[in-house]
Amino acid sequence: AQAAAKARAAVGPNATTPLAHQVTSMKETSAKQVFRRFPTANVPCSEKQLQRVYPGGMRIDSSNPNPISFWCFGSQMVALNYQTEDVSLIINQALFESTGNCGYVLKPEVMWNKLHPLHSRFNPLDKDFDNIPAAIVSLQIISGQFLCLSNPTAGLMVELEVQGLPHDCAKFKTPISNRNSLNPIWYETFRFQLHFSELAFLRFTVIEVSSYHTVAQRTILLSELRKELPTLFICTRIEYEIGESSSGGNNSGLAGSH
């Protein structure tokens, strides 16, 4: 309650002008409470001062909150538990990959361009945005190569998950490619709406259907996906046991178009 009161004092409509060299630090539960109560007030505040959101104390398993939930309200820094390689950490890595891992990513234009029609009244919780038509995205999963070398006869499918603002999130699945993990073919097309594509991520997960084990995955910012026919390299993990256990990376290919 005390942390939420401090957060409201920093973000709410009666907030004093923050000092640029100070950082507002909030735990995730306080930040969510404030953002729900003042959904349009935080973006102007974050123009004048850095903000940091950190995982709540109840995350004793070192899990992570979804950083998009705070980026979309203008918070610049979302602290994560790096010992847990979950979806939230992978989304964070995907965002900074878009600028070559230099450590900085420009915020969406609505958060800094005063000429934008939604500047100062942007509410990520809205279902629709005035003056911003929803984009229709069509994406086709065509085929894969060398996705599960340890079991060439495995049955595979691809899960496509859209991560973004609450009303943009969606999940799709391809049919199962039976007994073929070396060059499975799907040719499955998905169409979905995006109201705010600047913070939309695509997460591709290749799943071995008999065990529902994740064979490979890749998460990418939608704007980084090329418009021509791309080959998306996805990450697999191979573990070796020779004396001591170690792990190494391997690249497999997943082709698609949009």
Image (spheres, rainbow, N blue to C red):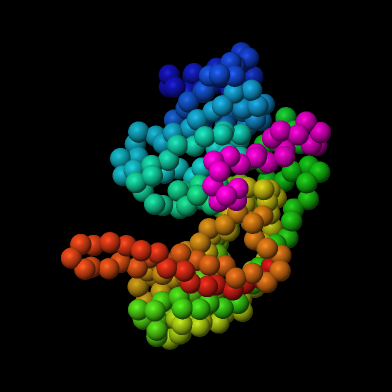
Query: Among all residues in the image, which is located at the extreme top?
Result: 16
Q: x, y (%) of residue 202? A: 58, 58
Q: Number of labelled discs?
A: 0
Residues 58 and 180: in front is 180
**Residue farthest to the left?**
243
**Which residue appears at 37% of the width and 69% of the height?**
213
Asked whether residue 36 is in view, the answer is: no
Quadrant of the frame with the N terminus: top left
User: Residue 138: x, y in percent?
Assistant: 69, 66
Q: Residue at x 53, y 77 (%)?
A: 144
| Residue 160 covered by magenta stretch | no
* 26 relative to 101, above or below: above
Q: Position of residue 134 (x, y in %)?
A: 74, 53
* Front-most of residues 96 and 72: 96
Q: What x and y, as percent, mark residue 221?
A: 60, 54
Whether residue 18 sits left or right of residue 242 in the image: it is right
Vertically, is 201 above or below 41? below
Q: Quadrant of residue 245?
A: bottom left
Q: Quadrant of residue 75?
A: top right
Give the quadrant of the C terminus. Answer: bottom right
Residue shown at 18% from the left, 65% from the top = 243
Range of magenta residues: 97-117
Main SS, magenta region, reads loop
Identify the residue at horizontal 40%, vertical 85% (top origin): 153
Whether residue 48 is visible, yes or no, is yes
